[in-house]
Image: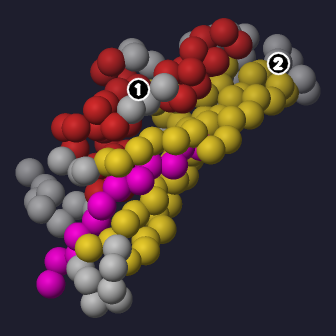
Amino acid sequence: MANTNNLLPKLAIKRRLEEIIVDEWKRELVDQFTTSVDDTPQVWIVQCDDQFSPISTVNNKKLFSTCTITVLAFSQTRETEVHEIISGLLNLAPADFKATGVKINSITPTSQSTSYQNDASQGHVFADVTLEIKYFFERTP
């Protein structure tokens, strides 16, 4: 088993988001864009970034972190289901991430968009959402 003591908080948050998508919502999670997507909506976490700022002084080990996660949902024809996934993401709360052990202060959607690909033989619907997750991070000595 891998040592998770030095796990970055953003990775714990990302893994919990994956659990929510797969185990709770019963959606298909992929790690790359696939061509010829069937009707079943697929979900892809395409970006996960952290930005840090000190809480008080530069020498303080505690930082305030903003984790930005972008999630893409897509399907050939199931526009409603794609938007149900996006709606679920827009409604996530810090309590959904308690199992991570990360003290999350807030989860705020910062953008959402939908696009339609019509040059494929049967079309395609893409929707994405960017979430801003704020939490405390303590540096190790």
Q: Nearer the viewer, residue 123 or 125?
A: 125
| Three-letter amino acid code of the residue under disc 1 | Ile
| Three-letter amino acid code of the residue under disc 2 | Gly
* Vertical order, 116 against 30 (above or below): above
| Image-quadrant location for residue 33 | top right
Question: Is residue 131 a member of the stretch shown in magenta?
Answer: yes
* Residue furthest to the bottom: 59
Residue 12 image point, x, y percent: 28, 49
Q: Which residue is mark 2?
A: 123
Q: Residue at x 39, y 32 (%)?
A: 93
* Vertical order, 60 against 87 (above or below): below
| Image-quadrant location for residue 6 | bottom left
Secondary structure found at label 2:
loop
Q: What range of the chain is rendered magenta?
A: 130-141
Residue 53 image point, x, y percent: 43, 74
Around disc 2, counting alpha carbons within 10 Å, would you say few (fewer than 14), some (14 to 19), or many (20 or more)?
few
Q: Quadrant of the C terminus?
A: bottom left
Q: Residue at x 48, y 68 (%)?
A: 51
Residue 136 image point, x, y percent: 30, 61
Q: Which residue is mark 1?
A: 21
Secondary structure found at label 1:
helix
Q: Nearer the viewer, residue 82 or 30?
A: 82
